[in-house]
Amino acid sequence: MPNYLRAALIFSTPLNLFGGVLLSPLWPPAWSPPGTIVAHPLHAWIISSFVFGFGLAYGWMAWKNEPNHLLIALAAYGKSCFVLAMYSQAALGEIPWTVGATATPDLILAAVFATFLWLDRGS
């Protein structure tokens, strides 16, 4: 595994684990960043469990030092979708740009994951 990919996975692990907790209904809405939308608890549990689960998978791949191409492709896709959703909602005025900009690390990670997949496509 290239060092840049392992570093991205190590960075993604706490980012996603914290994000999974932050998105869960356990996190009081009063503590949420201003401008965020509070989802129905069912939706919040589903989203937070996926985000948290991906955090565990990123940590596992970094620990094992073995990339899983399908999981990395799903990561690039998921992070790209998250960035698109956050930026588009900020552009539409649905959320403040200060909240939308919190997706910027995910944009960088999506690019790193996509770059790895592009460079490693012959393997």
Image (tube, helix red, strand yellow):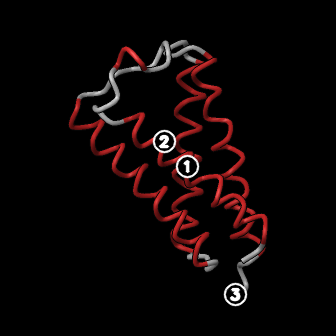
Q: In this view, does 11 lie above or below 36?
A: below
Amino acid type indicated by mark 3:
Ser
Q: Which residue is drawn at 45% across and 19% down?
A: 36
Dot 3 falls on a residue whose secondary structure is loop
Q: Residue at x 48, y 65 (%)?
A: 57
Disc 3 crowd, CA 10 A, few/some/many (<14, 14-19, 20+): few
Q: In this view, does 55 lie to the left or right of 24?
A: right
Q: Residue at x 52, y 72 (%)?
A: 70
CB contact under 8 Å: marks 2 and 1: yes
- Tell me the number on the disc at residue 83: none
- Tell me the number on the disc at residue 123: 3
Name the one closer to the observer, 101 or 121: 101
The earlier-in-sequence mark between 2 and 3 is 2
The percent coordinates of residue 114 (x first, y second) are 69, 61
Amino acid type indicated by mark 1:
Pro
Amino acid type indicated by mark 2:
Phe
Q: In this view, does 118 lie above or below 87?
A: below
Residue with the mark numbered 2: 18
Labels 2, 3: front one: 2
Disc 2 crowd, CA 10 A, few/some/many (<14, 14-19, 20+): some
Labels 1, 3: front one: 1
Disc 1 crowd, CA 10 A, few/some/many (<14, 14-19, 20+): some
Residue lying furthest bottom: 123
- Tell me the number on the disc at residue 14: 1
The earlier-in-sequence mark between 1 and 3 is 1
Name the one closer to the observer, 89 or 79: 79
The percent coordinates of residue 116 (x first, y second) are 73, 68
